[in-house]
Image (spheres, rainbow, N blue to C red):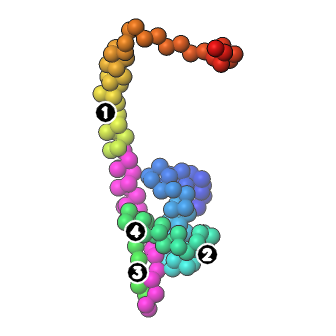
């Protein structure tokens, strides 16, 4: 991997935390690994690797294959990454389209404040004296 920080940032942007990214990168770099091997490579406890692998399988980034009664984890391919990026784009579009409605709530609520109410913010010594 050329720029690991850029890859970690990308994986973070599509919803993976640091440890999930670390496990995913281990599976990509070593193609076929057992949970025990991933645990040794990433220095993450085997119990946590099982939990992380379960999440990565649910997302669809890795899958399990069985060879000679041994379970290996392999990456599913870059198609799922494309889908996750498109999902983030649609979330951003939804936020962009909803923002004007949310902004209008702020201006509506500002007009409803009690005009007789005066808010004064004291700093320093004036803020703590009687």
Q: Is residue 78 magenta?
A: yes
Mark in the foreground, 3 or 2? 2
Q: Determine whether the residue tagged by mark 2 lies in a helix, strand or loop.
A: helix
Task: Categorize mark 2 by other alpha carbons within 10 Å: few (<14), some (14-19), many (20+).
Answer: few
Outermost residue toward the front in this view: 130
Task: Categorize mark 3 by other alpha carbons within 10 Å: few (<14), some (14-19), many (20+).
Answer: some
Quarter of the image holding residue 75?
Answer: bottom left
Outermost residue toward the top in this view: 116
Q: Determine whether the residue tagged by mark 3 lies in a helix, strand or loop.
A: strand
Question: In the rendering, at what x and y percent does residue 17 appear?
Answer: 51, 56
Residue in front for this viewpoint, 129 or 64: 129
> Image point 56% across, 15% down: which residue?
121
The residue that disc 1 covers is 98
- Mark sitting earlier along the chain (2/1): 2
Distance of label 3 from label 1 (alpha carbons): 43 Å
Q: Is residue 23 visible?
A: yes
Distance of label 2 from label 1 (alpha carbons): 45 Å
């Amino acid at each position: 991997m050329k720029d690991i920080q850029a890859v970690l940032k990308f994986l973070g942007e599509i919803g993976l935390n640091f440890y999930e990214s670390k496990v995913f990168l281990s599976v990509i770099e070593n193609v076929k690994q057992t949970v025990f091997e991933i645990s040794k490579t990433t220095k993450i406890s085997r119990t946590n690797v099982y939990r992380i692998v379960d999440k990565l399988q649910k997302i669809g980034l890795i899958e399990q294959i069985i060879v000679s009664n041994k379970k290996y984890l392999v990456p599913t391919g870059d198609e799922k990454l494309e889908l996750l990026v498109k999902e983030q784009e649609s979330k951003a579009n939804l936020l962009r389209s909803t923002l004007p409605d949310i902004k209008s709530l702020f201006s509506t609520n500002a007009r409803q404040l009690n005009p007789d109410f005066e808010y004064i913010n004291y700093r320093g010594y004036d803020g703590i004296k009687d």
